[in-house]
Amino acid sequence: MDKGTKWSDLRRKHGIADPHKVTHWCLGNEMDGPWQIGHMSAVEYGEKAADAARQMRYVDPSLKLIACGSSGPTMPTYLEWDREVLEQCYDYVDAISLHRYFDNTSETGGGDTGKFLALNLSMERQITEVAAVCEYVRGRKRSPKSSGCPSTNGMSGTVPAAALPWTATARKLRTCSRKCTTSKTHSWLAA
C-alpha cells in the first residue's frame, strides 16, 4: 500500500517500512485508580475488556491479551478488583497485570538498602495473592485453562518490549527451574 494511516505513514517516515507486529496487548492501565482518566468499576472495566478482547481476537486470534489488574496492595479494592474483572473477561484474556512501584524512600526502606532490597518479598506475596484469585475464578468458571507453572503459582509468559509502551527494552526476568518466568515490577499472571 502506497499510503496508509497517519501513524503508518509516520512509521515509514522514521525508516520502518513494515508494521511492528505487536502481539501482546494490555487492555488499559490502572483503571481502578481514581486518578485515571476513564476510571470505572471493576465490572464495567471487565465488560469493556471482554468486548475489546473479542473484537481484537476477531482480527487476530494469535494475540495475547492482558487484563488490567489492581493498581497494587494499597488500593482499597485490591484483589476484589482482580476477581471482579476476571469474572467478566476471564474467557477472553490470557493474563492479568500486576502493578507495583518500588523506590528507596521513607515508605519503602527510608534509605536503608537492606530493607529496600527485601521488598521483593512483598512482590512475591502479591504474585501469590493474585495467582490465588486467578485460580479461584478459574475454578468458579470450571475453565479448562492452564494456570501456568506450578512452581510460581501460575506465573507464565515473558514481557516483550512491544507489550509495554512505557519502556524501550524488555524487562529483565527471573527464570524458575521449570523455565517459566517471573518479573519483579510489571508482570502478568496467566488468567
Image (cartoon, rainbow, N blue to C red):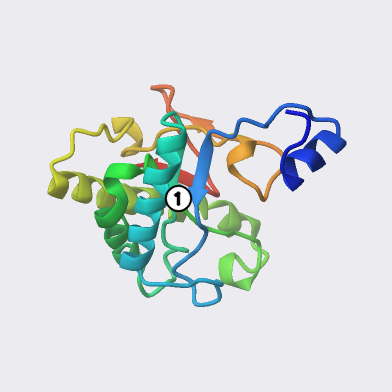
Residue visible at 61% across and 30% down in the picture: 21
Q: Is residue 183 left or right of residue 142?
A: right
State the residue in front, 151 or 65. Answer: 65
Q: Is residue 6 left or right of residue 99?
A: right
Q: Is residue 107 visible?
A: yes
Determine the residue positioned at 51% across, 71% down.
38
Q: Judge left or right: residue 68 versus residue 169.
A: left
Q: Residue at x 38, y 22 (%)?
A: 178
Q: Quadrant of the C terminus?
A: top left
Residue 20 placement (x, y as % from top left): 67, 32
Which residue is depicted at the point 44% across and 45% down?
Answer: 66
Q: Is residue 150 above or below residue 48?
A: above
Which quarter of the picture shows residue 76?
bottom left
Residue 85 image point, x, y percent: 32, 59
Q: Residue furthest top?
A: 178
For the residue pair 12 and 38, the one nearer the viewer reads as 12
* Image quadrant where one finds the N terminus: top right
| Front-lying residue, 167 or 57 | 57
Residue 96 visible (yes or no): no
Residue that lies at the very extreme toward the front in this rendered image = 2
The residue to which callout 1 is attached is 97
Percent coordinates x, y for residue 22 in the rendering: 59, 34
**Which of the pair 179/4 is nearer the observer?**
4
Q: In the rendered structure, which amino acid carries the disc numbered 1?
A: Ser
**147 left or right of 48?**
left
Q: Quadrant of residue 102?
A: bottom right
Dot 1: element: strand
